[in-house]
Image (spheres, grey):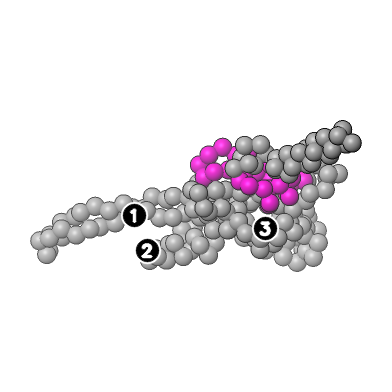
C-alpha cells in the first residue's frame, strides 16, 4: 500500500523512534508541487471523495486529487495523488532472544507490519474545506467529482450527488446510493394531498 506523508504518519513512526521511510512516490509528488509553485493559475482538483465507516461510530474521508499547471518554462504538467487521508499504523513483530552476555532473554522487535488507518474525520469543517476543490457542474462531465461510501475493507458504492454524500445516512447511502427518506416523505405528502382532494 502506498501512503503519503502526513502528520499522522510521521507521528506513528516517531512513536517507535523510527525515521520516516523514504518513498519514491512522495518524492516525485514533492518535485511536482515545487515545479508548479510559481504558477498562480495552477489547479488542484479533487476527482473522487470517499466516505469510509469504521465500526459503528467513526467515519473518515479519503480523496484523490489532480494538481495541474505550468512550470517556469511554460510547460504543462499534471499529476495525481490517490488515497489521501490514509496512513500506516505500525504493529511490532516481537521475539524473545537470549542476551548471551547477561544470560537472560529479552524482547526484541524484529520487524513491523502495517495496518491502514484514516486521519481526516468526516465532519462539517473537512467536508466544506475539501468541497471547494470539487467540481459538481453537470456540464463538466469529464471533470466532475465522483462520490462514494465504503465500510472499511468493504465494497465501494457510488453516491449520486455531493449533497447526498455529505448529508445522507451512511447505511442508506450504502444500500441505495442516494438519500431515499426525503423522496419517500415527498411521495407520502403527495399521497396525503391526493387523498384529501378525493375526499372533498
Asked if marks 1 and 3 touch (Cβ < 8 Å), the reply is: no
State the residue position of label 3. 127
* Residue drawn at point x = 74 percent, y = 59 percent: 132
Res 190 quadrant in image: top right
Pinpoint residue 112: horizontal percent, then vertical percent. Answer: 36, 53
Q: Mark 1 to mark 3: distance in Å? A: 34 Å
Describe residue 81's horizontal placement relative to residue 140 as left or right: left
Marks 2/1: CA–CA distance: 9 Å
Quarter assignment of residue 124: bottom right
What number is the disc on residue 161?
none
Residues at circles 2 and 1 in contact by the CB criterion of under 8 Å: yes
Task: Kindly identify which residue carries mark 1.
Answer: 92
* Whether residue 79 can be seen here: no
Which of the pair 115/35 is nearer the observer?
Answer: 115
Q: Residue 70: percent from the left, percent from the top? A: 78, 58
Instruction: Classify residue 176 by image quadrant.
Output: top right
Q: Say whether residue 80 is left or right of residue 53.
A: right
The magenta region covers 144-170
Amino acid at each position: 500500500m502506498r501512503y503519503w506523508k502526513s502528520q499522522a504518519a510521521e507521528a506513528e513512526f516517531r512513536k517507535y523512534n523510527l525515521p520516516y521511510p523514504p518513498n519514491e512516490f512522495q518524492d516525485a509528488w514533492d518535485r511536482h508541487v515545487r515545479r508548479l509553485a510559481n504558477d498562480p493559475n495552477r489547479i488542484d482538483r479533487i476527482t473522487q471523495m470517499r466516505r469510509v465507516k469504521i465500526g459503528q461510530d467513526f467515519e473518515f474521508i479519503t480523496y484523490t486529487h489532480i494538481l495541474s499547471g505550468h512550470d517556469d518554462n511554460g510547460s504543462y504538467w499534471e499529476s495525481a495523488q490517490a488515497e489521501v487521508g490514509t496512513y500506516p499504523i505500525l504493529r511490532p513483530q516481537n521475539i524473545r532472544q537470549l542476551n548471551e552476555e547477561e544470560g537472560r532473554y529479552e524482547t526484541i522487535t524484529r520487524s513491523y507490519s502495517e495496518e491502514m488507518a484514516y486521519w481526516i474525520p468526516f465532519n462539517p469543517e473537512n467536508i466544506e474545506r475539501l468541497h471547494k476543490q470539487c467540481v459538481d457542474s453537470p456540464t463538466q462531465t469529464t471533470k466532475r467529482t465522483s462520490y462514494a461510501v465504503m465500510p472499511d475493507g468493504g465494497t465501494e458504492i457510488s453516491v449520486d450527488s455531493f449533497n447526498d454524500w455529505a448529508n445522507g445516512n451512511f447505511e442508506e447511502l450504502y444500500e441505495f446510493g442516494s438519500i431515499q427518506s426525503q423522496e419517500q416523505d415527498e411521495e407520502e405528502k403527495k399521497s396525503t394531498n391526493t387523498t384529501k382532494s378525493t375526499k372533498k
